[in-house]
């Protein structure tokens, strides 16, 4: 009971501190509502040493949070992608900030019009546990590029990484510019209820609905990156060995704990066994051992581990074929690691067919022809990503034009996330809005339309009392 009271006081203190930071950032924004390009770039460039000078500490924090997190995956998926985004953003920022000239119609002559991009104010960023550095810092860079103040809520599932980011951000930025908040679910709920000028949430569709509901009370606009079940379609004639190799890049990274990881494979029905054999060979080549292999990332915590094991238990009990790929026949008892596993003969009543997997399990679904595969995708909620493997551009165009997804990779998986010059975001159940590229700058900006009239006032010809001038305008436009 004493511990519960202490935790309650601690959480109340976290919420109070968070509200104070928000008020300070709002006040600071009012004092300096439009930072110059040079000021924005200087702020963004502070992030590079924050990442590089503490590389070993980042690797250690994530490794401890996951029990095993491959160091090279941290370098690739957290650091390199973020640093490339930083370089791209500072290069493009001045161009994005330039006012855009627009044209006026005869009704608005003689005047001129343009659009200016104004910082929104204070932006909230809610970060998931799977890539906590990248998914905190990349949107931070974009929000700073748009001239905003930023508050970041880290996931309670990666406490060491969250604590490290909070410390390093506090050493790098004044609190009224950027601040990191850690805390449990109640702190996250309070965070989402703050009247931000924009709120970005990355996480599950279920939680995303709660976030949007909380934001709606303040009419806070939201960007939601929600994942979902991303399909991977293998074309009839695509080389299976190449498909397995390229799919493995997106599925094996972080042990499948990626919002755009392939969730299920749509495979030509006459090639299913060929895929199974190619996938076994690819996984065995990448991970000849898994249990003590530092390159093989563990499941982040017991809760997520139990969820994934529950999918397998449910699928087995309902008649699925479960193929575990365990090249060294290791015993994973007591570990948070799960071997890569294929699940065949899946039915819609199985939990694994309904939820985003978010782990090293993958469904294989046979299809007869490309139209059947497209129909299968379209009968389900729209995913964050779709992958199609085919050298035939005509087939690629059919898939692109007849399916909906947040983004697409042709003949590869997840690489589109690292392309800075295209938007990244979901559609439907997989989210709304985008925050990469110029679209990200627009997300965190107010596109303010401006009209300026010169010394000559043509409006005087249509002022009441209405007479010949107004009648001539009406006749010209409406009575042709």
Image: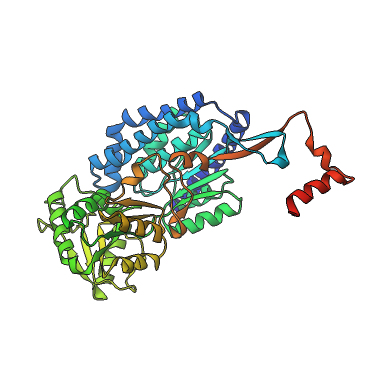
- At horizontal 60% and vertical 28% (from top left) the residue drawn is 32
The figure's colour scheme reads rainbow
| Residue nearer the viewer, 7 or 181 | 181
**Does 181 sit above or below residue 398?**
above
- Extreme front residue here? 480
- At horizontal 54% and vertical 30% (from top left) the residue drawn is 98
Q: Is residue 164 visible?
A: yes
| Residue nearer the viewer, 177 or 87 | 87
Q: Is residue 178 visible?
A: no
Q: Quadrant of the N terminus?
A: bottom left
Displayed quadrant of residue 101: top right
**Does 108 sit above or below residue 317?**
above
Q: Quadrant of the C terminus?
A: bottom right
| 57 on left or right of 170 | left
Q: Position of residue 394 (x, y in %)?
A: 32, 57
| 350 on left or right of 463 | left
- Extreme bottom residue here? 318
- At horizontal 62% and vertical 29% (from top left) the residue drawn is 31
Q: Position of residue 279 (x, y in %)?
A: 17, 58
| Residue nearer the viewer, 17 or 84 | 84
Q: Position of residue 292 (x, y in %)?
A: 15, 48
**Does 267 sit above or below residue 386?**
below
Q: Position of residue 206 (x, y in %)?
A: 45, 60
- Extreme left residue here? 328
- At horizontal 42% and vertical 54% (from top left) the residue drawn is 226
């Amino acid at each position: 009971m004493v511990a519960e009271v202490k935790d309650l006081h601690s959480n109340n203190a976290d919420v109070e501190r968070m509200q104070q930071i928000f008020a300070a950032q709002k006040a600071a924004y009012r004092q300096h509502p439009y930072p110059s390009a040079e000021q924005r770039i200087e702020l963004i460039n502070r992030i590079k040493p924050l990442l590089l000078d503490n590389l070993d500490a980042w690797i250690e924090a994530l490794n401890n949070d996951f029990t095993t997190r491959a160091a090279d995956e941290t370098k690739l998926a957290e650091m390199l992608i973020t640093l490339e985004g930083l370089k791209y953003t500072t290069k493009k920022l001045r161009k994005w900030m330039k006012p855009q000239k627009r044209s006026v119609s005869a009704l608005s002559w003689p005047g001129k019009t343009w659009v200016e991009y104004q910082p929104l104010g204070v932006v909230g960023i809610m970060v998931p546990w799977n890539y906590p550095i990248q998914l905190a810092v990349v949107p931070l860079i974009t929000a700073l590029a748009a001239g905003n103040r930023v508050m970041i809520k880290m996931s309670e599932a990666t406490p060491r990484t969250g604590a490290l980011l909070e410390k390093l951000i506090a050493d790098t930025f004044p609190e009224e510019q950027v601040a990191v908040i850690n805390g449990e679910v109640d702190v996250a709920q309070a965070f989402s209820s703050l009247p931000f000028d924009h709120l970005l949430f990355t996480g599950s569709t279920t939680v995303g609905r709660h976030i949007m509901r909380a934001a709606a009370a303040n009419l806070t606009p939201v960007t939601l990156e929600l994942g979902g079940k991303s399909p991977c379609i293998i074309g009839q004639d695509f080389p299976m060995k190449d498909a397995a190799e390229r799919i493995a890049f997106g599925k094996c990274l972080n042990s499948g704990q990626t919002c755009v990881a392939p969730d299920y494979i749509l495979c030509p029905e006459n090639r299913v066994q060929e895929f199974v054999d190619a996938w076994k060979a690819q996984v065995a080549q990448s991970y000849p051992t898994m249990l003590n292999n530092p390159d093989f990332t563990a499941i982040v915590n017991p809760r997520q581990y139990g969820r994934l094991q529950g999918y397998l238990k449910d699928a087995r009990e309902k008649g699925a074929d479960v193929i575990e790929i365990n090249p060294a026949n290791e015993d994973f008892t007591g570990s948070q690691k799960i071997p890569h596993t294929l699940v065949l003969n899946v039915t819609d009543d199985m939990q694994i067919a309904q939820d985003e997997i978010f782990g090293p399990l993958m469904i294989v679904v046979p299809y007869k022809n490309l139209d059947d595969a497209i129909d299968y995708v379209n009968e389900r909620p729209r995913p964050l990503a779709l992958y199609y493997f085919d050298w035939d551009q005509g087939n690629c165009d059919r898939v692109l034009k007849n399916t909906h997804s947040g983004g697409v990779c042709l003949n590869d998986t997840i690489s589109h996330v690292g392309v800075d010059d295209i938007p990244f975001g979901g559609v439907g159940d997989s989210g709304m809005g985008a925050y990469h590229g110029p679209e990200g700058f627009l997300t965190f900006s107010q596109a303010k339309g401006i009209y300026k009239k010169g010394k000559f006032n043509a409006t005087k010809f249509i002022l009441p009392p209405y007479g010949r001038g107004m009648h001539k305008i009406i006749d010209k436009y409406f009575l042709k």
